[in-house]
Amino acid sequence: MNEQLDLPEAVAAYFSADRLDSEAVVRCFTREAVVRDENQAHTGIDAIKRWRAEVGSKFVYTSRPLSQTRDGDTIVVTSCLTGNFPGSPVDLRYAFRLERGKIASLEIMK
């Protein structure tokens, strides 16, 4: 899983935190971070916390990172998402941009 991929520390921390709760997830982000998911942008720690709490209240899921690539300063992780949501399982791409050891932006795409 994460260890085999040798993910950057902040990215590995995100996937580990995502198994827990919104409090754990927001600790992975910078204060001004932006998450883009399902055509919506969530800017700042409070908005990211609300986004993750809402997702966690709707669905039970696991995310298993499969591969990673780099495109300039962006790390793209393909992960298999399995859970109680329509279309499960699905491979999603997570595009991370890091700043000072934390996630500055995350875009989740099909």
Image: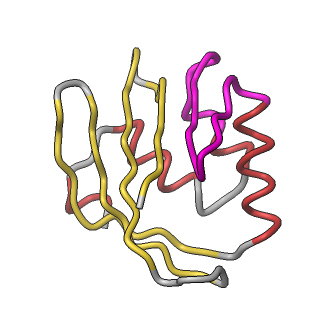
Q: Position of residue 74 (x, y in %)?
A: 27, 32
Q: Is residue 63 above or below residue 15?
A: below
Q: Position of residue 104 (x, y in %)?
A: 48, 24
Q: Is residue 42 magenta?
A: yes
Q: Position of residue 89 (x, y in %)?
A: 47, 83
Near-viewer residue (107 or 12): 107
Q: Which color mode does the image show? A: secondary structure
Q: Is residue 101 above or below residue 12?
A: above
Near-viewer residue (20 or 47): 47
The quarter in which the N terminus is drawn is bottom left
Residue at position x 66%, y 45% in the image:
24
Residue range (magenta) = 26-46
Number of marks in the rendered image: 0
The quarter in which the C terminus is drawn is bottom left
Q: Position of residue 27 (x, y in %)?
A: 62, 33
Residue at position x 65%, y 80% in the image:
85
Per the picture, the main secondary structure of the magenta-coloured stretch is strand
Horizontally, residue 109 falls left or right of residue 59, namely left
Q: Quadrant of residue 26?
A: top right
Residue at position x 74%, y 43% in the image:
23
Q: Is residue 32 magenta?
A: yes
Horizontally, residue 30 falls left or right of residue 103, namely right
Direction front: furthest residue: 39
Q: Is residue 48 above or below residue 18?
A: above
Q: Is residue 82 above or below residue 47?
A: below
